[in-house]
């Protein structure tokens, strides 16, 4: 009986010693493995992005959407991937999906004028003037440009506000 207890204690001490010796090594190896996986995913994301961007610029929107969806899935932190995906959706006549991507970009970065203008274009095409104004007016504090003022003027004109429309046209 005493020898069994002694063996169990010896095994427990050996396990504890092994844990104390391997534990710090495992803790160091785990972040390195995670970092390698993250880098591999980022590289794959860049590859999908490049092929999607090329497809979009050559007019192959279905291929662009597929590749850019994979790029966004590989690296969700890249706003440029999401913006190109939104553009591809728009050109592929998938406005609701483009709208969702652009709203997500604007939620994360309310000062992203390019995303706001693209969303404004979608709303203008749909003649959704109230949403166009709601998206673009706040962006004027970040950048003043012809595109934003022109879209706002068109929206205000269509909302029967000719004075505001003229004001935006004059900017």
Image: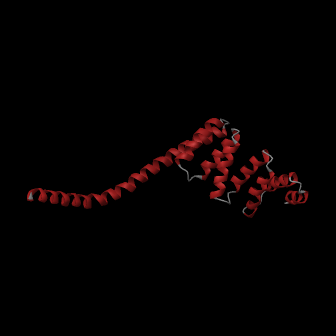
* Foreground residue among 7 and 161: 7
In the picture, which quadrant includes the C terminus? bottom right
For residue 64, above or below residue 131:
above
Seen at 65% across and 57% down, the residue is 107
Question: Residue 150: x percent and y percent?
Answer: 82, 53
Seen at 70% across and 56% down, the residue is 113
Q: Is residue 165 left or right of residue 71?
A: right
- Residue that lies at the very extreme toward the front in this rendered image: 1
* Foreground residue among 66 and 145: 66
Query: Is residue 45 shown to the viewer in this render?
Result: yes
Q: Is residue 124 left or right of residue 44?
A: right
Question: Residue 120: x percent and y percent?
Answer: 75, 51
Seen at 85% across and 58% down, the residue is 168
For residue 43, above or below residue 61:
below
Q: Which quadrant of the figure has residue 142?
A: bottom right
Seen at 74% across and 61% down, the residue is 138
Q: Is residue 64 left or right of residue 45?
A: right
- Residue that lies at the very extreme toward the left in this rendered image: 2
Image color mode: secondary structure
Query: Is residue 143 shown to the viewer in this render?
Result: no
How many labels were placed on the picture?
Answer: 0
In the picture, which quadrant includes the N terminus? bottom left
For residue 109, above or below residue 88:
below
Q: Is residue 169 left or right of residue 134?
A: right
- Residue that lies at the very extreme toward the right in this rendered image: 162
């Amino acid at each position: 009986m005493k020898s069994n207890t002694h063996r169990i204690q010896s095994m427990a001490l050996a396990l504890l010693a092994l844990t104390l010796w391997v534990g710090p090594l495992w803790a160091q190896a785990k972040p390195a493995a995670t970092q390698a996986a993250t880098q591999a995913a980022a590289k794959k994301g860049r590859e999908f992005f490049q092929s999607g961007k090329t497809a979009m610029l050559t007019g192959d929107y279905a291929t662009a959407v597929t590749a850019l969806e994979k790029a966004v899935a590989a690296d969700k932190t890249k706003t440029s991937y999401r913006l190109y995906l939104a553009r591809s959706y728009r050109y592929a006549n998938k406005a609701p999906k483009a709208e969702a991507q652009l709203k997500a970009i604007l939620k994360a970065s309310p000062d992203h004028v390019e995303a706001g203008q693209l969303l404004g274009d979608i709303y203008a095409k749909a003649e959704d003037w109230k949403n166009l104004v709601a998206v673009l007016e706040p962006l004027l504090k970040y950048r003043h440009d012809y595109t934003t003022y022109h879209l706002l003027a068109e929206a205000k004109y269509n909302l029967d506000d000719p004075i505001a429309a003229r004001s935006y046209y004059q900017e």
